[in-house]
Image: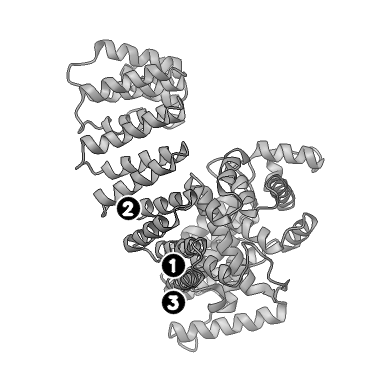
Amino acid sequence: VDYFPLYYDAYIALVDLVNAGVPVSDLDRGIVDYFAQQDDVALAALNRYAQTMPAEHDGAVHHYRALTLRALGQYQAAIDEWDVLLTTHPVEDPYFTDGWEQRVDTLWAYMDQYTRASSDSLAFADLYPDHPRAGEFIFYAAQIAERANQLVEAARLWDLLVSRYPQDELAFRAAFLAGVARFRLGEYNAAVDAFNSALDLAGEVEDQAAAYLWIGKTRTSLGDHSGAEQAWRAAQVVDPGGYYGLRAEEILRGGHPFQKAGVVTFPDEEERLADRQAAEQWMRQVFNLEAGVDLTGLMPELAADERLLQGEELWALGEFGQAKEELDALRVAVQEDPVATFQLMLRFIDMGLYQPGIRCAFQILYLAGLDQVPASDAPAFLSSIRFGPYFGEIILPAAEAQQFDPLFILSVARQESLFESFATSYAAARGLMQIVPSTGETIAATEGWPPGFTPDDLYRPIVSVRLGVRYLADQRYLFNGDLYATLAAYNAGPGNVLAWDALAAGDPDLFLEVIRLDQPRDYIRSIYWAYRQYQDLYAAP
């Protein structure tokens, strides 16, 4: 109750304490009840505390009363309570900045008062210009203006952040989004200036490539095709294996995202054996191994490790989650040893424990300094581990049945679960394709299969893949074949995507940047990147 109030177990603990007659502060009761979504009870406890609280107190009671009032739909009362916090407590109060942020959030997200919310967010930076979150509040003000389609104001605010706080960690993103806003407004010269400003602020090669890609797109809109080509080639040079570098290369050759590159062919057993032998020779050279080192078996201390023995026994018993926990602990323990990591990689892949096996392959490349190179530039055997056609006997026919490129579906499955059929996410999504039970039930009803569907069926690869591919096909139909929108809908739901799709007007690059949530944006980029690796490995022109 004292230290972990946001967890449900704290609520169970609170009930036990109250039933046992143990005194618990009404403030603690209110906070725990709020996080357990017992809003009426939470408000009553917080109100009791407010009547008897000491004269010297922090802003906790005001902040949680406001949050509870908002949860109860009493939005103006919540705003009034946050106003009490902000007018009676100093900026140093531990709840002051969170209270200000939540008040702003309530104004636009719950009360549709976008202009007021943006103004009030900016006010924080004006009143407390030296606060470490001042730049963040300006950024938030710009985001709110953009959500209200006030693009001129959004661009002005993002520019303001850059001019006031050029060292802020959000400065690059602010300059970049100012460029996107001006691109959407058709102010292409101003957009180029903003993207050049972003380029100057970019610390990561991915950010540099993003700025170059958009300089190229904007110069194309200005009719400067030579300048556009120069910018896109610069994106390729600074980040050849990253999303924006790959996308720039694709634009230069006239391609479009997720365009099939040719006939898909996977190596046969003879080719895989040759690749494996070549990888073993590469290991010996790169890590200067002695001739007698056996890479194919397990070194004695590894074979006798209790984690390996227990993990394999649990795996044989079908206790996959516990088995992975033991075996993954062993993988992490030996991750600085390339030989042990290579041996475990082979063992895991042979077992069908693909996720740790893939991580082993990545770790070997990391130890060799090759973790950032394209898959086609790494040893073929290690690349085939990292980007294998796992569950191909299920995925390939399911993809063909719904007219998807099989490499696309492999890329989605890789992103969703890293080919772990027993995976469960924090959001209760299950299986290879990470489908939540309610969605699985709906798709199963539509398909009329499998008979007697239960949520546990989602752990069966054949069920997860068929239902996942069908759901992707439904989203593709909804968004007229646009695979960026399809992926965003699979990840974040079609409701959000309808708004983003309308803003993008068919431009996949613009669609990616107008996504207002980090997760689906990163999701699309990761799948695109994996798809390009699969193409380089298996798609013959």
Q: Which of marks 2 and 3 is nearer the N terminus?
A: 2
At horizontal 59% and vertical 76% (from top left) the residue drawn is 381
Q: Which of marks 3 and 1 is nearer the N terminus?
A: 1
As displayed, is residue 209 above or below residue 125?
below
| Residue 183, position as x, y percentages in the image | 47, 53
Q: Residue 127 carries which label?
A: none
Q: Which colour scheme is used?
A: one colour
Residue with the mark numbered 1: 335
- Spatial CA distance of label 1 from label 2 is 36 Å
Q: In this view, does 378 lie to the left or right of 163?
A: right
Q: Is mark 3 on a helix, strand or loop?
A: loop
At horizontal 48% and vertical 52% (from top left) the residue drawn is 186
Q: What residue type is labelled 3?
A: Ala
Q: What element carries label 2?
A: helix
Q: In which quarter of the image is the C terminus?
A: bottom right
- The foreground one among 146 and 441 is 146
Q: In this view, does 392 lie to the left or right of 418?
A: right
Q: In which quarter of the image is the N terminus?
A: top left
| Residue 321, position as x, y percentages in the image | 57, 50
Q: Which mark is residue 368?
A: 3
Visible residue check, residue 373: yes
- The foreground one among 333 and 511 is 511
| Residue 279, position as x, y percentages in the image | 56, 81
Residue with the mark numbered 2: 171
